[in-house]
Amino acid sequence: MGTVKHPERHLPLRGISLDDMTFELVAIAASVAGHCQPCFMHHLGKAKGLGASEEDIRKCIMIAGKISAAGDQRMAEFVENAIKAAEESK
């Protein structure tokens, strides 16, 4: 398994910077939505080390799960429509 490279902890975002805790919570959500288990474990450890509560971590995971599920459903619908369109164009 390759090494995951992480950006700087304070990313400029429209003139503001993310504090370490926020960065790790966002990274947890992105890891869940991206289905990256090593990323999740890394950022979970970092967030817990910074004092993130289990409740906050679980909220981030729940939000990411909903986003991921919606994206999965939309992709499934897109794939089905693309297959139908390809069959109809024969």
Image (cartoon, rainbow, N blue to C red):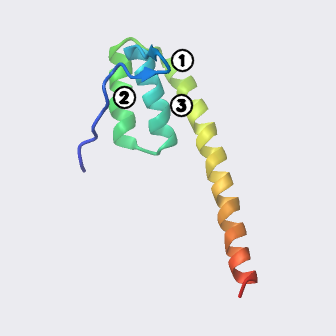
Kindly state the secondary structure of the residue where label 3 is placed: helix
Label total for image:
3
Residue 51 in the image, given as x and y percentages of width and height? 39, 11
Image height of 44 relative to 4, above or below: above
Q: Residues within 10 Å of mark 1 (few under 14, many from 20)?
A: few
- Tell me the residue that label 2 is attached to: 43
> Mark 3 is on which residue type?
Ile
Q: Residues within 10 Å of mark 2 (few under 14, many from 20)?
A: many
Which one is in front in this view, the residue at disc 3 or the one at disc 1?
3
Q: Residue at x 41, y 44 (%)?
A: 36
The quarter of the displayed image where residue 43 is located: top left
Label 3 to label 1, Cα distance in Å? 10 Å
Chain-order first, disc 2 or disc 1:
2
Tell me: 58 left or right of 51: right
Chain-order first, disc 3 or disc 2:
2
Label 2 to label 1, Cα distance in Å? 15 Å
Query: In the rendered image, which quarter contains the C terminus?
Result: bottom right
Q: Residue at x 23, y 43 (%)?
A: 3
Kindly state the secondary structure of the residue where label 1 is placed: helix
Residue 31 in the image, given as x and y percentages of width and height? 44, 37
Q: Residue furthest right?
A: 88
Residue 70 in the image, given as x and y percentages of width and height? 66, 45
Kindly state the secondary structure of the residue where label 2 is placed: helix
Q: Residue furthest bottom?
A: 90
Q: Residue furthest front?
A: 15
Do the residues bearing badges 3 and 2 touch, measured as CB atoms within 8 Å?
no
- Tell me the residue that label 3 is attached to: 61
- Tell me the residue that label 1 is attached to: 55
Residue 72 in the image, given as x and y percentages of width and height? 62, 52
The quarter of the displayed image where residue 28 is located: top left
